[in-house]
Image: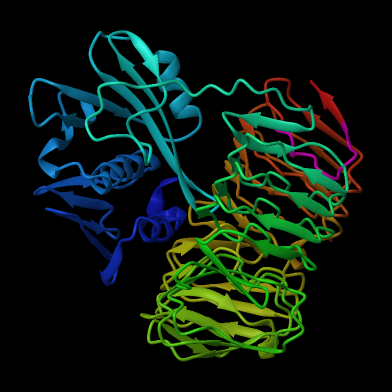
């Protein structure tokens, strides 16, 4: 059996987006480079490593990316590479002051989330200049957190921010003195979540950042008025706000994540920022190199992407049902996570040397990655090219017209269930990295459920075999035939959106062995009557979104 390590960058497939967001260019298959002021970093993604200053470093896990990212952040701020070293003096990264080599800041790096929280809780001040750092890619933006310790005093700002000086000798603390109404969940100036249900929402002045998913799937809101204090709108900020009609981009906004307005079919955007261009409902960055959002209500049946565009953003054409044809022009070199997802009538015409469009499937330049399937192509039996190694996330999302997908032996990576809501599909697998058992797709070891199509459910019931440790992200999404599932003892994880949209699911018992139930796990499970959940499991805010099940703690 061929086994992959859970949560490695190479297997997670987020790595290409991460490298691209940092500005790295793919100079050869799986080899990325970026030339800084006086050095170059080369990433060998297939080998899961990067080279910096003549040495090679691992690039296997999220911590490794954070190490690479903090080096990138420092070098782009203007630090000389001779003053930024890796794995030195017990630290992950060290900044040395050029005027006095005895002055330095040692940086401990960790992965985002629980690992960083543990790093903070375990840290004991040493009296030295030290920093605790983490970063992640979220909604198309690279976010970071830092805690700086100087002379046994703690600070949170002054080292990595855009306006922070090189080699600073003073630092500050993030502190927001303002009090906001209860409907606004705010932390350090970021609107984390809008909790209200007003049709017209005036976001309070003082908020500087509209967080990832801040208005996620809020069906009450019709208009959002953003204050001039806002400088950043994160990816998916207003995603699935179906009734949102008006929103403004304030003049001070200079940063925006992946399509914040995806799933808002009738939205009218008013742009006041010189950092963005809005043309006939299509939103670009200032240079019109990055296509961020195409408004779904546009009545045009055809669209030719401007030749200035080099990057088409994630879900930027989401659910544009009027479109029949989109022309990918010659300078488009990269595309985010299925830019044309849920466009039910679309076909593509490709003029770019960076892609191939074959039998309704869009591939990358080397025909090693499957990026999109066109629902308007009429192809019902999809035989992926024999060179494909990666099946990208969401590339078959909602493709209920497909009857069969044939996975070739060359495939090594499948993103978060790219087959979600394929209601009528049968998977024929030939990859040694995966296995099909009774119509369900697992990884090669049988430890992770990748995808369960509705066609695999017999008499409404699924019994997962012993040995399964992880129900993957969106593994059962849209499995409308599922009424009952029996999970094995020993199961450890239920991934994000694992059972979302299982509208027929009536009951489920979570084994004591489960350590984590991710957010949106049972989103939209409207028939679910009761769920037995062990007391030690922390339930996240949206785990049972749009689901009225009785939660029984044992």
Seen at 72% across and 89% down, the residue is 301
* Quadrant (top left/top right/bottom left/bottom right) for the N terminus: bottom left
Q: Please say if 10 is above or below 371.
A: above
**Left or right of 148 on screen, residue 280:** right
Q: Tell me, what colour scheme is on the image? A: rainbow
In reply to whether residue 424 is colored magenta, the answer given is no
Depth order, front residue of 98/23 = 98
Name the main secondary structure of what is drawn in magenta. Answer: loop
What is the total number of numbered labels drawn onto the structure image? 0
Seen at 72% across and 87% down, the residue is 300
**Left or right of 65 on screen, residue 513:** right
Depth order, front residue of 92/429 = 92
User: Residue 136's x, y, as percent?
Assistant: 45, 43
In reply to whether residue 549 is colored magenta, the answer given is yes
Inspect this view and state whether residue 491 appears.
no
Q: Please say if 34 is above or below 181.
A: below
Q: Quadrant of residue 314?
A: bottom right
Seen at 84% across and 61% down, the residue is 481
Q: Please say if 16 is above or below 63.
A: below
**Left or right of 66 on screen, residue 95:** left
Depth order, front residue of 106/420 = 106
The magenta region covers 540-550
Q: Please say if 206 is above or below 417.
A: above
Q: Quadrant of residue 264?
A: bottom right
* Quadrant (top left/top right/bottom left/bottom right) for the C terminus: top right
User: Residue 153's x, y, as percent?
Assistant: 35, 10
Seen at 35% across and 40% down, the residue is 66
User: Residue 59's x, y, as percent?
Assistant: 29, 47
User: Residue 519's x, y, as percent?
Assistant: 68, 40
Inspect this view and state whether residue 36 appears.
yes
Q: Quadrant of residue 375?
A: bottom right
């Amino acid at each position: 059996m061929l086994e992959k390590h859970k949560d490695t960058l190479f297997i997670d497939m987020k790595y290409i987006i991460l490298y691209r967001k940092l500005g790295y260019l793919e100079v050869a298959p799986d080899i990325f480079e970026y030339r800084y002021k006086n050095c170059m970093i080369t990433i060998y993604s297939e080998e899961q490593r990067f080279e910096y200053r003549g040495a090679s470093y691992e690039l296997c896990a999220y911590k490794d990316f954070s190490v690479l990212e903090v080096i990138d952040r420092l070098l782009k701020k203007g630090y000389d590479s001779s003053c930024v070293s890796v794995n030195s003096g017990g630290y992950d990264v060290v900044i040395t002051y050029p005027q006095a080599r005895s002055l330095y800041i040692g940086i401990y790096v960790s992965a985002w989330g629980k690992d960083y929280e543990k790093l903070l809780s375990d840290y004991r001040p040493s009296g030295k200049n030290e920093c605790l750092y983490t970063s992640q890619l979220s909604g198309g933006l690279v976010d970071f957190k830092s805690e700086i310790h100087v002379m046994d005093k703690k600070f949170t700002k002054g080292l990595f921010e855009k306006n922070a000086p090189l080699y600073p000798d003073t630092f500050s603390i993030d502190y927001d003195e303002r009090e906001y109404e209860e409907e606004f969940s705010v932390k350090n100036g970021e609107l984390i979540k809008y909790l209200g249900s007003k049709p017209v929402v005036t976001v309070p002045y003082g908020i500087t950042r509209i967080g990832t998913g801040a208005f996620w799937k809020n069906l009450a809101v019709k208009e959002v008025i953003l204050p001039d204090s806002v400088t950043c709108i994160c990816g998916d900020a207003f995603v699935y706000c179906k009734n949102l009609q008006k929103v403004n981009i304030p003049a001070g906004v200079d940063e925006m994540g992946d399509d914040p307005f995806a799933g808002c079919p009738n939205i009218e955007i008013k742009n006041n920022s010189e950092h963005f261009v809005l043309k006939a409902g299509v939103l670009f960055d200032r240079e019109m190199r990055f296509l961020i959002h195409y408004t779904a209500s546009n009545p045009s049946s055809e669209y030719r992407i401007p030749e200035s565009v080099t990057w088409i953003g994630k879900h930027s054409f989401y659910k544009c049902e009027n479109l029949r044809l989109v022309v990918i022009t010659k300078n488009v070199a990269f595309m985010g996570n299925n830019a044309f997802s849920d466009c039910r009538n679309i076909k593509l015409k490709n003029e770019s040397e960076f892609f191939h469009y074959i039998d309704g499937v869009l591939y990358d330049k080397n025909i090693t990655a499957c990026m999109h399937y066109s629902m308007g192509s009429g192809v019902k039996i999809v035989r992926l090219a024999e060179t494909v190694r990666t099946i990208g996330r969401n590339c078959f999302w909602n493709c209920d017209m497909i009857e069969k997908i044939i996975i070739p032996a060359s495939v090594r990576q499948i993103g978060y269930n790219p087959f979600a809501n394929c209601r009528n599909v049968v998977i024929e697998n030939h990859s040694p990295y995966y296995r099909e058992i009774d119509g369900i797709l697992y990884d090669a070891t049988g430890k992770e459920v990748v995808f369960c199509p509705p066609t695999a459910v017999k008499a409404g019931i699924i019994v997962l075999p012993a040995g399964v440790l992880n129900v993957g992200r969106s593994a059962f999404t849209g499995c409308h035939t599922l009424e009952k599932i029996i999970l094995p003892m020993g199961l450890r994880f239920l991934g994000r959106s694992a059972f979302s949209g299982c509208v027929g699911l009536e009951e489920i018992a979570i084994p004591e062995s489960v350590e984590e139930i991710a957010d949106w796990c049972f989103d939209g499970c409207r028939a679910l009557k009761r769920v037995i959940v062990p007391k030690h499991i922390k339930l996240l805010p949206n785990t049972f979104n749009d689901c009225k099940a009785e939660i029984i703690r044992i």
